[in-house]
Amino acid sequence: MPASHRLTIAPPLPATGAGRGFALVITLALMVLLTLLVVGLLGLSAISLRSSRQAQDLAVAQSNARLAMMLALGEIQTALGPDKRVSADASAVIATAKQAHLTGAWDSWRWDPAKSSAPAYGEKGAKFRRWLVSTADPASAKNFGLPAADSVGEGVELVGTLSNRGVANSVRAATIAISEPKRTGGAAWAVFDESAKAAIDMGDPAKAPVLGEEVASRNAPNRF
């Protein structure tokens, strides 16, 4: 080939310093964006796990409360189901009751005047059935002196400790542990006698009603 037609290929030019710096800036920016993306995804997953855990705990708590209600209904049917059973608060039978609002169940008792001149109230003790409250030991609920003793062990305070005219209002129920593989926690329950309570939304007897209120009370009850 003649020298005038010879093809010469020049080697590639080396990258300049400005080109290498621009590539480094782009790489660092991408790494920062990826880091922010990873941190955001981790935070989102943590929030999702926390929300699902709270929803699961709420479902377990509601399930345990439903179980406690079913246990309470079962004990009511067992202790007070027969027509000859009666109930009373602990304050009515134990003067030193520390849990005055516990409800107890008894077999009914009838005094026969032909047999004795006065009722033998000592016979009532043998007719006691149980206190309608959850206990760690089922036999403890059949102990007549349970309301007078200090509550021991782990329990739940269902009614606060505020006192009313010297009568303690605190009611504690022992927690019954639930040992199932898919259910944790415990259940506690107590039954209160609504027949011994007065309604707080009734009219004030010391205040004379006006004519309109008196007419209205004859057409509709004072409470629902």
Image: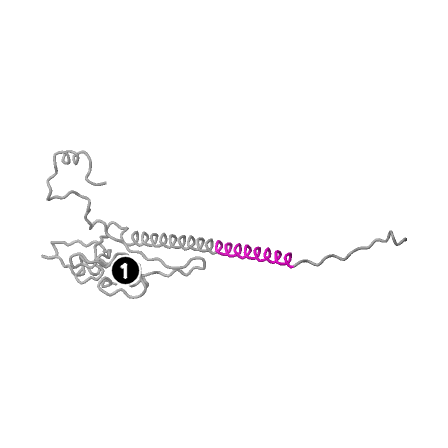
Q: Is residue 30 shown in magenta? A: yes
Task: Classify residue 120 by image quadrant.
Answer: bottom left
Circle 1 SS class: strand
| Residue 2 appears anywhere in the view | yes
> Residue 46's spot in the image, x, y percent?
47, 56
Task: Classify residue 203 by image quadrant.
Answer: top left
Residue 215 shown left or right of residue 71 in the figure: left
Q: Residue at x 63, y 57 (%)?
A: 18
How packed is label 1: few (under 14 Cα within 10 Å), some, or many (20 or more)?
A: many
Q: Residue at x 37, y 59 (%)?
A: 186
Check the picture and name the quadrant holding the C terminus: top left
> Residue 52's spot in the image, x, y percent?
45, 53
Number of callouts: 1
| Residue linked to disc 1 | 172
Q: Residue at x 51, y 54 (%)?
A: 41
Q: Which residues are magenta?
A: 17-45
Q: Residue furthest front?
A: 4
Q: Label 1 sits on what residue type?
A: Arg
